Amino acid sequence: MIPCPRRARLNSISTSGPTITRHHWHSLSSTLRLRCPGVAFPAERCCTVRETNGSTVPRRQLGRLLTQLRESAHISIDAAAGELDCSRQKLWRIERGLTSAKTPDVRVLCELYRATPDQASVLLGLAEVSRAEGWWHAHGSSVPAWFSLYVGLENVASSIRHYNAELVPGLLQTPGYATALFEHNRPELGEEERKKAVGFRTQRQGLLARRLPPAPELTVILSEAVLRRPVPGRSVMADQLRHLLAVGERHNITVRVLPLAAGPPLAAEAGTFVLLDFPLSALGSPTEPPTVYVEGLTGALYLDQPTEIAAYERVWRGLDSLALGARQSAELIDAIRGECYE
């Protein structure tokens, strides 16, 4: 059996897939408990699909369960793709949760893998809800396909840890700062496109203030260089630093600064990254595996293997040991604001 790749890289070339039909899964109030006796994914390791926005989580859950059923049946991904009359790449993308699976295709795979009626019912249910669209789909081309998966994961995460050595993260950017970045980095965008891109970035920030489901805990570690690197317009940067001070007062947001005097951290090799953790199910297991998101210019890496997570956790511990505490960070941010931009 040819092993399925464990790492997913999304870019503008490899994101084609079946059209997602509009199905407002976020309006559903039911809960699907994944009970899969007799196969390689026992009930205690399966998670609960709860109400959310978009298709990211059920799509990934469907992919994992299909993979486990296929491997339990000792069927190669090539053989399964042949039964579906599709390419190996298409089935791999379904198993990795990168694209939706059509209900008839899931039914064929259930028969091929000899799924029990209960298992088939769960998988077909996931296939249905995984074709939902999140709010971000309304922004069209403002949201690259490779970034759409991240927005879906960010939207259901319970904890977001972000390290950035270059820029203020999108979740904490002011409209003025975001506009200045788009004007500088994407001069080819027209005014309307730029407004849409900034509007999307601003709308993402709503998850930090929501009540239900509970807003995620956001911890951001910024290099001091981010605070000293101006964007066009001194007042824009002054407003951005004031915003960092304000949001840092919220109960679920922590902003810390890695001072230049701390020297090069392990993160100098890792670069900018985001660590996502997810809520626990009723059984006490994460509804999604921890995921590391690493963004590039034209695509992104989504890492969820234990060794990969452990490597980035080690980097985060190093950053945590070198960064200033929240209060000291706020004092430094305020000092830089007065020194450089007022």
Image (spheres, helix red, strand yellow):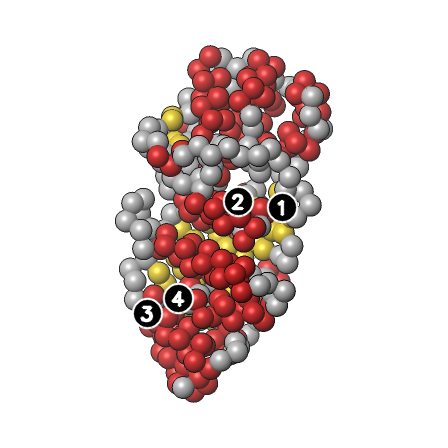
Q: Is residue 47 above or below residue 107?
A: below
Location of the C terminus (image quadrant): bottom left
Which residue is rendered at x = 45% and y = 42% of the image? 134
Residue designated by label 4: 255
**Dot 2: element:** helix
Q: Sequence-wise, which precedes: disc 4 or disc 1?
A: 1
Query: Which of label 2 and label 4 is nearer to you?
Result: 2
Disc 1 vs disc 2: Cβ atoms closer than 8 Å?
A: yes
**Dot 1: element:** strand
Q: CA distance from mark 3 to mark 4?
A: 10 Å
Camera-side residue: 53 or 122? 53
Residue designated by label 3: 246
Residue designated by label 1: 10
Query: Which of label 3 and label 4 is nearer to you?
Result: 3
Which residue is rendered at x = 69% and y = 21% of the image? 85
Residue designated by label 2: 149
Disc 3 vs disc 2: Cβ atoms closer than 8 Å?
A: no
Disc 3 vs disc 1: Cβ atoms closer than 8 Å?
A: no
Q: CA distance from mark 3 to mark 2?
A: 29 Å
Q: Amino acid at mark 1?
A: Leu
Q: Sequence-wise, which precedes: disc 3 or disc 2?
A: 2
Q: Amino acid at mark 3?
A: Ala
Q: Say left or right for 246 vs 134.
A: left
Location of the N terminus (image quadrant): top right
Residue 6's quadrant in the figure? Answer: top right
Q: CA distance from mark 4 to mark 1?
A: 29 Å
Q: Sequence-wise, which precedes: disc 2 or disc 4?
A: 2
The x and y percentages for residue 339 are 43, 87
Q: CA distance from mark 2 to mark 4?
A: 25 Å
Q: Sequence-wise, which precedes: disc 3 or disc 1?
A: 1
**Dot 3: element:** helix
